[in-house]
Image (cartoon, rainbow, N blue to C red):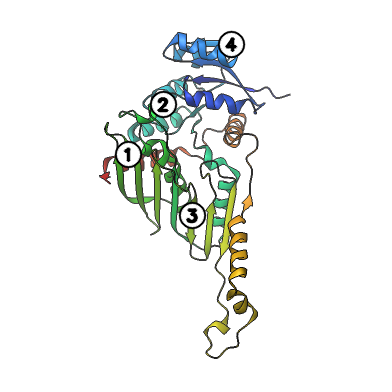
Amino acid sequence: MTQPIRLGIAGTGRMAARMLRALKHDPDVTVTAIASGDGARARWFADQCGVAEATGNLTDMVQNEQVDAVYVAGRTRDHAAAALQSVKARKPVLVEKPLALTADQARTLAEAARESDCLVMENLWCLALPAYLALRDQLAGGAYGSPVHLHFDFGYPVQPENHASLFDPDDGGVILDRAVYGVALALNLLGPVTDVDCNAQRNDRGVDVMADLRLHHQSGAVSHVAVALNALMSNTASLACTHGHLGLGAPVVGAEVLTASQMLPAAETEARPGAQVGLTDRIRAWPRARKIKRKRDMSAGRFLGYGADPYLPVLTHFVELIRGGQRESGLIPLDLSVSTLEILQQARGRTVEG
């Protein structure tokens, strides 16, 4: 019987707790250690979660023989340094998004991972969801033509007292925390970006709480990524293509519904003067029929479930990479993570107050 991967978690905050909840549904991973800069906090957190080992020294955890791999779940500003320690210890590491605070940090981490032949993967977990994979496969199949425009929005209001790190001027803000999902998807579907525009609203501490990013792709396509910490958005994704449309239903971060529609050629009779009115035209002229069709279209969509927890697909992928001796993910490659962070950094730097 294959033994579970023994995972050490670096961090004791909200994301560490969230990952532990997901891992309860994954028999292929067991958490064996917790690390935090505060040893007492690490011990308390470990006790709450039923984990035997706890330490206030990350180096001790990554060198622990009872730890096979590491999940970095601390503050964004600490992601790169913590991941580098894991790389030095030759321990595969799953890093919470964003991969680092700056693009330079991300590039340094990627270079170290490749030089050490050590697996480093960003936890862009949405890209592993069945609905996201199906969206990518449908687009690649060619039936919907070429993608020309992506609209992605992700927003719901949260309060600073409950999410302090999101509102920290140093490494918080909606661009780093939420735009990362839309930008990664845009790169994944539409390819490299040549120009970035961004409008944002900031609070009285200078933290971006709402942002609209417009990405111009090398292919000529355009992506619009809207995110918010202070408003409820539609939380959907819409991909317009030359021969149809593909979409992800709400909640877009955790989507389980894929919608698809193809643009069929118009019937020749529509262009002929004096053509007889057919059954389709008569049905279109009936308001009740249009209402029924509208309700049917609104409920349409292919359900693609992720199982007991939305993090399970990415955890399964991470475990498969470790057991297969892989040094990089083809699904969430380091180049994608670095490019995503480059765009986020540009957006933060080019922000025009909205």
Q: Nearer the viewer, mark 1 or mark 3?
A: 3
Label ID, residue 238: 3
Q: Residue furthest bottom?
A: 274
Residue under numbered circle 2: 79
Residue at image point 52% right, 32% down:
327
Q: CA distance from mark 4 to mark 1?
A: 39 Å
Q: Nearer the viewer, mark 2 or mark 4?
A: 4
Is 210 placed left or right of 350 in the picture? right
Q: Amino acid at mark 4?
A: Ala
- Residues 256 and 72: in front is 256
Disc 1 is placed on an element classified as helix
**Labels 2 and 4: the sequence-earlier one:** 4
Asked whether the beta carbons under mark 2 and mark 3 sit within 8 Å of each other, the answer is: no
Q: Amino acid at mark 2?
A: His
Disc 2 is placed on an element classified as helix
Q: Nearer the viewer, mark 4 or mark 3?
A: 3
- Residues 193 and 11: in front is 11
Asked whether the beta carbons under mark 1 and mark 3 sit within 8 Å of each other, the answer is: no
Bin the neighbour count of mark 3 within 10 Å (Cα to Cα): few under 14, some 14-19, many 20 and up.
many
Q: CA distance from mark 1 to mark 3?
A: 24 Å
- Residues 309 and 84: in front is 309
Q: Amino acid at mark 1?
A: Gln
Label ID, residue 345: 1
